[in-house]
Amino acid sequence: MPSLVWLLLLAHATLALSTDENLSDAYKSIFILAGQSNMAGRAGVIAGKLGGDVPPACTPSPFILRLNPNLTWEEARDPLHEGIDVHKPCGIGPGMPFANSVLERDSSIGVIGLVPCAIGATNLTSWSRGHVNYNRMLMRAQAALSDGRGVIRAILWFQGEGDAVFEQDAMCYKEKLKTFFNDIRSDLQMPELPIIQVALPTRNAGNYTDEIREAQLGLELPNLKCVDAWGLPVIKGDAVHLNTDSQIQVGHMLADAFLQLTTASPPPPPSAESCA
């Protein structure tokens, strides 16, 4: 009897491993995560690395993948931006709570592919077309699509602290943001691509935070939503970066906004006839 139990457990483990491995080849709903440090996530970092228990909202799932720095798919887990945002230790951001929330509320979305691109301490100019962060984001987005087994469902954007310090940056922010969103839609050849941005949570980013928030909340484009993180608690001793509970809340707000913008079921893969 023990040998039979062992064989059944081995068969189950082999099947699970095979299923997990095959998910990288599954048709994916792809989400681009971009912006600066609050998108990359600084919550939960202890002594330079993510520590403590993983909150249920951030639990890994074989149905949630990330495009890693080597441009290959792997099971996603925090810190999502490890190896991407390399200048500071990365922790919990909104990406995993977002993906788990969407998956829980509409499992028909299938496999979710997260493409982390955020870089801490960056202003909007560094994300404009032709600059390194923009080019890198576009390259990673195209790499996520290169196998023909997925579609980009939305861009999740959390940025603005880097433009709240100087008046000139803040005064130009709204027009630059509009141009940035239009450019990335154009370069991805997806003119109606949903974009969901997060309005800054605190005035501690700089003297012109109010102007940045006004631009974020007031920008009107088709298929654009802005979720407001105003007042969410930050990490103790840190004036800017959201704590774990706040990042989870932002992830859920992003999921709400996405599900309001579009049905979560991905379009079917192209058939052989349509490609002929």
Image: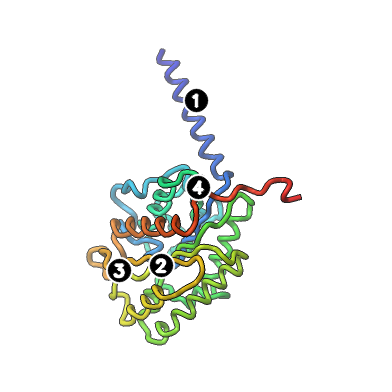
Which amino acid is tagged 2?
A: Cys
Q: Position of residue 9 (x, y in %)?
A: 44, 24
Image side of residue 14 versus residue 232, left or right:
right
**Label 3 – label 4 distance at C-alpha:** 30 Å
Nearer to us in this view, 157 or 20: 157
Which residue is located at x 54 percent, y 42 percent? Answer: 23
Q: Nearer the viewer, mark 3 or mark 2?
A: 2
Mark toward the start of the polypeptide (3 vs 4): 4
Secondary element under disc 4, as helix, strand or loop, is helix
Look at label 3 and name its amino acid: Trp
**Residue at mark 4:** 109
Amino acid type of disc 4? Ile
Q: Which mark is residue 224?
A: none
The residue labelled by disc 3 is: 230
Residue 71 location, quadrant: bottom right
Q: Residue at x 51, y 39 (%)?
A: 20
